[in-house]
Image (cartoon, rainbow, N blue to C red):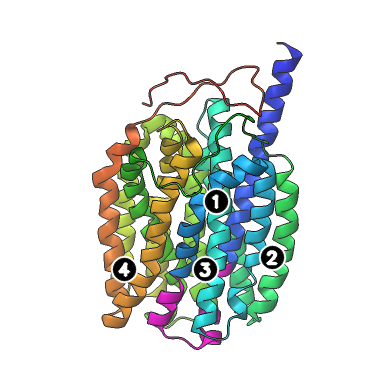
């Protein structure tokens, strides 16, 4: 085998590990934040409905910012863009716990979400590019690394909540560590740069038509994921009267099943196909939602959240992978699907809070269970899309040629 080919393969393997580490760091920020939501709610002195309103602002910020990601990568290159945007995201972890009231919390969460969305699009576009060049599925395992990071962050947050520590100090320490780790990880990602004669993408790109149906499936999954991640600890505390430590552990259980399912997801999808995998996952999510709303004890509800995590785990990675193969501009298509899924993240927290204020959190998770049924109904749209083969001696700064390889 020519030395140049061996060298290129080694660079791709390093790039895969590097982008996996980026996903892990990104997830750790979310896990660190989610477990301290009850503390942040108490610190800001707000009701469940007001918390639901505030938790809509990360998705608002992300939805506004994500269409700008393609332009940033085009101008500065993918590595430099990711380095700066990921650092902004890790440092933004410190903002919500500093907020003393609803208005400042909404502003902090808007900035937090904008940084999350921008870095999310760039890292997913890099993940799809590595997947295409390796010519094998890796997106589920990359999102599994995100869930692993969320698990690590939520485990640390559970310990901090159990010890009764101040979330401001906890998040400052976490942000410092994660910023350093993120900067190190970004050194190894692909440095994709546009050709000088290539026109820049639109400054604010709407989702392409090809992304709409794919995004609808992601919408259902992210609604269940966001509701569980943001509200599971509050649910156990308010509905089942558990301690702060046990309530935070429900978030950890959810993150654990998400991580395990995503890390194993590539092999499952290769064996059973995306459609069958998502339909089966939808059924598991429905079972999980039923357990949550009927739970007489905390352990049953925690099991329900674990099933929800298992059921929706691979949907978003498959949606991003399908979007990356759905059109000529993977970043724009991914940004489109991400915008739709983040819109679900926008609706979920406020919808859960509004329904909880009007009725109860139990009814709110009945809505989550209903939307999980959409995964079984609409899974067929993920059958579309071809995986591009890898040029054996491709330069990592150029895009590989496409070749049709129909998905099973």
- Residue at point 49%, 62% (across, down): 253
Q: Check residue 49 for magenta coloring.
A: yes
Residue at the limit of the structure toward the top, as seen here: 1
Q: Quadrant of the C terminus?
A: top left
Q: Could you tell whether 373 is left or right of 197 in the image?
A: left
Percent across and percent down for residue 243 are: 50, 81
Which comes sooner in the sequence, label 4 or label 1?
A: 1
Q: Which residue is labeled 2 in the image?
A: 175
| Secondary structure of residue under mark 3 | helix
For the residue carrying disc 2, how many other residues have a C-alpha within 10 Å: few (<14), some (14-19), or many (20+)?
Answer: many
Q: Which residue is labeled 3 in the image?
A: 110
Check the image and report above or below for 255 versus 233. Answer: above
Q: Which residue is labeled 1 in the image?
A: 120
Q: Which mark is residue 365?
A: 4
Question: CB under 8 Å between callouts 2 and 1?
Answer: no
- Residue at point 41%, 26% (across, down): 386
Which comes sooner in the sequence, label 1 or label 3?
A: 3
Check the image and report above or below for 134 versus 33. Answer: above
Q: Check residue 168 for magenta coloring.
A: no
Indicate which label's residue lies in the foreground, 4 or 1. 1
Percent across and percent down for residue 25 are: 64, 54
Question: CB under 8 Å between callouts 4 and 1?
Answer: no
As rendered, which of 156 and 109 lies closer to the eye? 109
Indicate which label's residue lies in the foreground, 2 or 4. 2
As rendered, which of 26 and 57 lies closer to the eye? 57
- Residue at point 65%, 60% (across, down): 88
Q: Could you tell whether 235 is left or right of 196 in the image?
A: left
As rendered, which of 147 and 46 lies closer to the eye? 46
């Amino acid at each position: 085998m020519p030395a140049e080919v061996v060298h290129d393969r080694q660079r791709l393997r390093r790039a895969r590990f590097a982008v996996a580490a980026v996903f892990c760091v990104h997830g750790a920020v979310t896990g660190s934040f989610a477990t301290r939501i009850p503390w942040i709610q108490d610190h800001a002195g707000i009701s469940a409905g007001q918390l639901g309103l505030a938790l809509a602002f990360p998705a608002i910020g992300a939805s506004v910012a994500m269409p700008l990601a393609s332009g940033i990568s085009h101008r500065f290159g993918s590595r430099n863009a990711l380095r700066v945007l990921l650092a902004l995201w890790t440092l933004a972890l410190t903002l919500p716990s500093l907020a003393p009231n609803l208005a400042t919390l909404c502003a902090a969460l808007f900035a937090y979400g904008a940084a999350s969305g921008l870095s999310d699009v760039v890292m997913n576009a890099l993940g799809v590019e590595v997947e295409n060049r390796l010519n094998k599925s890796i997106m589920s395992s990359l999102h599994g690394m995100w869930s692993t990071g969320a698990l690590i962050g939520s485990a640390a947050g559970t310990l901090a909540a159990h010890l009764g520590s101040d979330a401001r100090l906890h998040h400052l320490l976490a942000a410092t560590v994660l910023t350093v780790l993120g900067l190190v990880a970004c050194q190894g990602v692909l440095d994709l740069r546009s050709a000088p004669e290539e026109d820049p993408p639109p400054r604010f790109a709407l989702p392409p038509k090809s992304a709409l149906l794919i995004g609808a499936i992601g919408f259902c999954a992210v609604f269940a994921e966001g509701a569980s991640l943001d509200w599971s600890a509050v649910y156990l505390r308010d509905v089942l009267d558990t301690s702060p430590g046990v309530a935070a552990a429900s978030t950890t259980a959810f993150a654990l099943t998400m991580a395990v399912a995503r890390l194993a997801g590539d092999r499952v999808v290769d064996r059973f196909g995306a459609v069958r995998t998502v339909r089966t996952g939808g059924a598991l999510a429905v079972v999980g939602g039923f357990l949550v709303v009927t739970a007489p004890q905390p352990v049953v509800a925690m099991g329900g959240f674990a099933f929800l995590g298992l059921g929706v785990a691979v949907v978003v990675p498959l949606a991003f992978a399908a979007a990356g193969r759905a059109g000529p501009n993977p970043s724009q298509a991914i940004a489109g699907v991400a915008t739709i899924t983040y819109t679900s993240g926008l609706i979920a927290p406020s919808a859960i809070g509004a329904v909880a204020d009007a009725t109860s959190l139990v009814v709110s998770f009945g809505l989550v269970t209903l939307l999980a049924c959409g995964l079984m109904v609409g899974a067929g749209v993920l059958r579309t899309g071809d995986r591009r083969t890898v040029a054996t001696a491709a330069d990592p700064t150029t895009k590989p040629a496409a070749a049709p390889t129909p998905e099973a």
